[in-house]
Amino acid sequence: AEKREREIAEAMSGLENVARPVESRMAAEKSDADILRELLTGERRAYSFQFEKRDLAKTTSNAPVPTSFSNAVIDQARLVGPMLDPSVVTVLNTASGEDLVLPSLSSWSTAGLEAEAATIDESDPAFAKTTLKAYKYAFIVQVSQEFLADSNIDVIGFLGQQAGNAIGYAVNSVLTTGTGTVQPNGIVTASAAGGTGGTGVAGAFTADNLIDLVYSLDGAARRLPGFGVMANGASIGAMRKLKTSGGDYVFVPTIQPGTPDSILGVPLIEQPAMASTGTANKSVIAGHFPSYYVRQVGGIDVARSDDFAFNTGQVTLRFQIRVDGNLPQSSHIKHFVGAAT
């Protein structure tokens, strides 16, 4: 009997998809749009959308292509800041929200000159730890039954834009300037001092200030991939006007699509959540931005309630995301700050 079973299994090998085609199984899988519509019609009570990770090439098509709901949300979030972009910072995705400990090196071992036959001194490296938590950012949006009944409304695009703007602005802001107490430790807050501006100029920087800032970092950090300069649009506008003593602009606009502008030969990233130039303002940071770690728990959770606003005939949708961020190696990113006077 065992021999016959083995012979049958060998004969049927490779024919599983013929008996049950792959296309039929795939057709049964529901898209993000179908799941969201089930949430809106009440067929489904809750669902967790996971971020899709894939490379997108602009050259694949000149025509607009439809996107799933989770992609629409993260695309909108990135428009309001770079702190959720894995090409700028390091994003860690975890399934659950318990504390996440990141070990880091706080000091190197040191070597010294030793005499012949003398006892060699011990020098051990020292370690530190950074704990990432899971802070929740959320909002609700209410949609009338009449709105849902209008089939001409692009529900995916509308809700994606609302969730992207609400979550994107809130999360990008705290990942930039958060205090680190009951919210993430922002990349600007966690950075080390790299230079101070002159007095009597309302916190403005000079070309020499930017040179000092870039070269205040260790040469090893400057050679790491991902090293750059970050500032908001107003500060970048001021950079474009800076010239060297020879009259050459220090700002170099890009001529290749998809490539960032550069300042002093270093890539320049626009960050709308950073402060503009001003007295005591940290208006520019420079460093290895992947050294900043963003912890994200799962994806964006979406839940529906028909009971919350039942008397007004509205459907309530809740969006929430859990994130944290910190810079384990503060020496990898430094800031320029305007003088206090």
Image (cartoon, grey):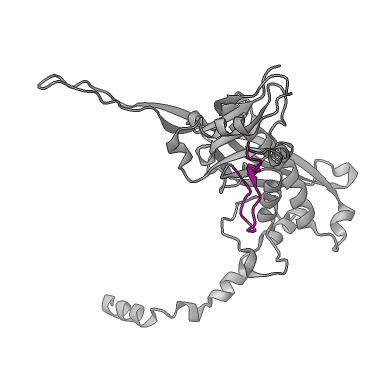
**Residue 41 visible in the current orientation:** no
Point out the stretch of residues depicted in magenta.
Answer: 244-263
Q: So how many labels did they put on this image?
A: 0
In this view, the residue farthest toward the top is: 341
State whether residue 171 is above or below residue 196: below
Q: Measuring from the top left, give residue 12's x and y in whole percent.
A: 39, 81
Q: Nearer the viewer, residue 31 or 132?
A: 132
**Which residue is drawn at the image coordinates 64% and 35% (left, top)?**
136
**Which residue is drawn at the image coordinates 85% and 47% (left, top)?**
314
Tell me: 229 left or right of 38: left
Q: Measuring from the top left, give residue 304's x and y in whole percent.
A: 74, 47
Tell me: 28 left or right of 233: left
Q: Which quadrant does the N terminus fall into?
A: bottom left
Q: Measuring from the top left, give residue 178's x and y in whole percent.
A: 64, 29
State whether residue 105 is above or below residue 164: above
Q: Which quadrant does the C terminus fall into?
A: top right
In this view, the residue farthest toward the front is: 246
Q: Measuring from the top left, give residue 310's x and y in whole percent.
A: 85, 44
Dominant secondary structure of the residues highlighted in magenta in the image: loop
Q: Is residue 225 magenta?
A: no
**Residue 213 visible in the current orientation:** yes
**Which residue is drawn at the image coordinates 63% and 67% (left, top)?**
59
**Which residue is drawn at the image coordinates 73% and 54% (left, top)?**
39
Tell me: 201 left or right of 215: right
In this view, the residue farthest toward the left is: 117
Q: Nearer the viewer, residue 266 or 93?
A: 266
Tell me: 52 left or right of 150: left
Q: Is residue 256 magenta?
A: yes
